[in-house]
Image (tube, rainbow, N blue to C red):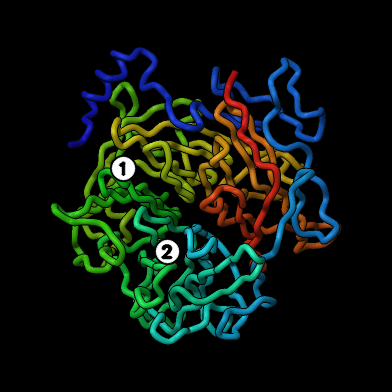
Amino acid sequence: MSLTRRDFTRQTALTGAGVALTGVVGALATAPGALAAEDGAVGESHDDTEGEGQASHGQREPGYGPLIPDPDGILALPAGFSYRVLARSGVTRLESGEFTPGKHDGTATFEGPRGVTLLVVNHELKGVRSSVEHPVPLTEGLVYDPAAPGGCTVVESHRSGEVAQWVGIAGTVQNCAGGSTPWGTWLTCEETEDRVGKNGAAKDHGYVFEVDPCDRRANQDPKPVKALGRYAHEAVVVDPKRGHLYLTEDADTPNGLLYRWVPPHGFKHGRGRLRTLADDAGVLQAATCYDSGGRFVDDLSRATRIGTVYGVDWTEVPDRDARTVSVRKQFGAGEVTRGRKLEGMWWGDGGAYVVSSYARDESPLQHDGQVWFYDPRRRTLTLKVRFGVNPDPSRDGAYDGPDNITVSPYGGLILAEDGEGVQHLIGATDSGRTYPIARNELNLGTAEDPGYSEFAGVVFSPDGRTLYASIQTPGIMLAITGPWKRQPRRP
């Protein structure tokens, strides 16, 4: 049953200030360059390179202290932390002998046998396969389209330090983010709308595929889950209680959409069950938002105050396979709510955290990042984090462009920065403070004009002791360990 505009208007009137904010991150804000949670004013810059970890009012400062430059020029970390390179494109090799593919992106971890951690890693590779230096190898039985360069690999990390790698799926295009499932598999998302013939493709692309890290036989003969639609997929999460899937679209002209897939009556989730669905199974819908006054919201960039709450209705997609018109173009003005760079997602606290990486001239208002929380029980979307436009991306500590996201077992969120200039892994506490966890020091430019690749694939190990992340270019997977601690909650 949808939440009508009248219901939402009545609900917010009864509660006065709107729906209460709950969850691990509460009413998040960000600093520097963020809008404060209390009054919408620009938050003051927080310099993590000073002090002894104590705030002036006696509260413990968030984070782990200043970042220490890395003599190897890869990753700056706080004192007491260290990293290990698990895989590097063009250097390490798969068990079949081929080099690790490049362009690491979305990643999930799974508990393997005897203390092994299994990681499924997307490789965001696109274009003509022959032009890609290290494509995902075309492993027999695991290929969807032999002309495509992308796919997933599985990294097996042992406590002893031994690492093994193999192909999970090959022959896909621009595997960007994705999401893990409650039944222990990975859903990899193609961020493309390429049709047969584009870059030599033998099949249509723009789908979601399921990869099982624990059963290689289950990955044979890859089949797209067409019920989830064909568009520029970014990420996906699963509601373990209701069985709904939520998906983001990274696209513009016009801006992309937030989707929900409702399974058909009687469908039971489980390993391999999605690939048994008919192409038109269930219902694919796009989000339509409205404010507390019942007014339609055309674009998520309209929200400038932390704690903004929108009611959400869901509008059915007419042609989910986009046979003639892209899915996002099938809706007219006033039918759905759009958002630029709808990217990472993570399920936690009974709902879905959703990232909009930035908004520029293609959007009504500009920003350098938002994090929203969708509450399926209340059918509301709440703005938790907003980064104002970064005036100086070259300055260390001025964050912008959040992309991949995870909920930390130590409180708050961890965001992978994919912006301009310096790139970080960023922590955000529930009281609205941000702090750096790591800084990419691998300069791909020159001393005069430095350039740094984005972070991606941020995720903790099942036991919470190791934070994994990748530097997308050239493709380096890192395992970060250290004295993790629970971050201070709001005073």
Quarter of the picture containing the C terminus is top right
Find residue 372 and report its horizontal and vertical position in percent. Answer: 45, 37
Residue at left offset 58%, top offset 79%? 94
Find residue 84 and report its horizontal and vertical position in percent. Answer: 70, 61
Front one among 312 and 426? 426
In the image, residue 166 above or below residue 74 = below
Question: Which quarter of the figure has residue 63?
Answer: top right
Residue at left offset 22%, top offset 68%? 276
Q: Badge 1: few (under 14), some or many (20 or more) residues near its Cα, within 10 Å?
A: some
- The amino acid at mark 1 is Ala
Question: Which quarter of the figure has residue 185?
Answer: bottom left
Name the residue beneath numbered marker 1. Answer: 287
- The amino acid at mark 2 is Thr
Name the residue beneath numbered marker 2. Answer: 188
Front one among 151 and 339? 151
In the image, residue 34 above or below residue 363 = above
Residue 226 makes an appearance in the image: no
In the image, residue 477 above or below residue 285 = below
In the image, residue 177 above or below residue 465 = below
